[in-house]
Amino acid sequence: MTKPSALPKVRNPRKPTLPDVARIEVVDLFCGAGGLSCGLKKAGVRVVAGIDVDATCKYPYEANHPGAKFLLQDVTTLTGADLKALWSPTSVRLLAGCAPCQPFSSYANTKVAAENDKWGLLYQFGRLVAETKPDLVTMENVPGLAAQAPFKAFLRILKAAGYNIQYAVLNAADYGAPQQRKRLVLLASLLGRVQMPAATHPGSARWVTVRDAVGALPAIDDGEVSTQDPLHRASALSPLNQQRVRASRPGGTWRDWPADLVAECHRKPSGQHSAGVYGRMEWDKPAPTMTTLCIGYGNGRFGHPQQHRGISLREAAIFQSFPPSYKFVKPGSPVLAKRLARLIGNAVPPKLGEAVGRALQAAVRSPAGTADA
Ligand SMILES: C[S@@+](CC[C@H](N)C(=O)[O-])C[C@H]1O[C@@H](n2cnc3c(N)ncnc32)[C@H](O)[C@@H]1O
């Protein structure tokens, strides 16, 4: 038998790098309509499965990620063994998750919200990380989560399992989305160092504006659906709100209105602080953060900069940086505007997801952390 020491020495042995032998595959917990998966796919990640309890996510998820499974399942009932069966044996396994952010947002950070059992969903994500030890993990949520106990517990799980971790609050506008949207993003790897993605559109001079994004769409009235695009539809306004939107100026608030248009609640001292509602967007800035209620003119600064209406579903999808070809509604099915606004407003902007995907690809290619994201 040859002794190990007698084996011929190989000069410059070619050490296989991970991309030669494996591809990143993602299982997307809380996948929604697939905004995060869409961005990761653009960065070359293979999307193998998305899991969500909301059946309305099934069509957009499957239609835009052919080959991926959509599991209509509560994450709390999912086991590590269920998850492991979804990844290919040779893949670099990525577990991604964007647990519902409402319990962590500042306005919901009340006693009632603290009792909300959705707080537990991040613990569930942590449990699944501990049970499956994926090579890579990414998580996205509202900035306020960073100071909360569930996030600290999540970090403890990752540290105990030996992950290299980076997290920061990123603005989607710095990554090419025409929207100001600040989110806590975490990247973790068992393969080596990870770096947060470098901004592709750093600083206000490079941000994509409302004009760049939707300035060329056909004009529509409130309550009208474009003949060219069933998603370019604006909610009907009451006669009072029609007067109010006409009295609103881009970047302004209800404080610009004549007194007779001001709502009863805003006349009280307690209502003076809610200046961010009933506003119009500004042409030359990114849109404000899209929410699940973004097609309601009274729900934020969601008025069109010029036309007398709130934004359309199409405009909301564009502000979230979904590609124009993204399939939201099965052909022949009715467009259920409120449901669709929820899926769109809930999404991780694909442009941000793409940046995360590129950072993870860089971490896999160069685990010592020398590559740029
Ligand atoms: C913030 S959204 C995720 C958006 C998604 N990552 C995207 O980019 O489109 C959170 C999602 O969690 C889902 N969800 C809430 N509770 C859940 C549970 N117990 N199990 C699975 N999904 C859940 C909601 O239906 C919602 O679609």
Image (spheres, rainbow, N blue to C red):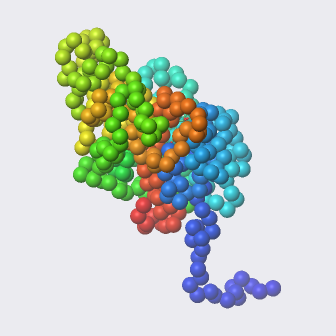
Residue 369 seen: yes
**In the image, what residue occupies the spot 70% across and 41% down?**
79
* Left or right: 330, with 205 as reference point: right
- Ligand 1: give its quadrant: top right
**In the image, what residue occupies the spot 52% across and 21% down?**
115
Residue 274 seen: no
Q: Work out whether residue 324 or residue 347 is closer to the camera in this orientation and state it.
A: 324
Q: In which quadrant of the rendered image does the N terminus lie?
A: bottom right
Q: Quadrant of residue 122?
A: top right
Q: In which quadrant of the rendered image does the C terminus lie?
A: bottom left
The x and y percentages for residue 121 are 57, 34
Q: Quadrant of residue 307?
A: top left
* Left or right: 157, with 322 as reference point: right
Q: Quadrant of residue 301?
A: top left
The x and y percentages for residue 316 are 41, 38
Number of marks in the rendered image: 0
**In the image, what residue occupies the spot 24% across and 51% down?**
205
Q: Work out whether residue 345 or residue 190 is closer to the camera in this orientation and state it.
A: 345
**In the image, what residue occupies the spot 48% across and 40% down?**
347
**Is 260 drawn above or below residue 189 in the view shown?**
above
The x and y percentages for residue 276 are 29, 27
Q: Work out whether residue 356 or residue 34 is closer to the camera in this orientation and state it.
A: 34
* Left or right: 82, with 115 as reference point: right
> Farthest residue toward the front?
227
The x and y percentages for residue 342 are 49, 31
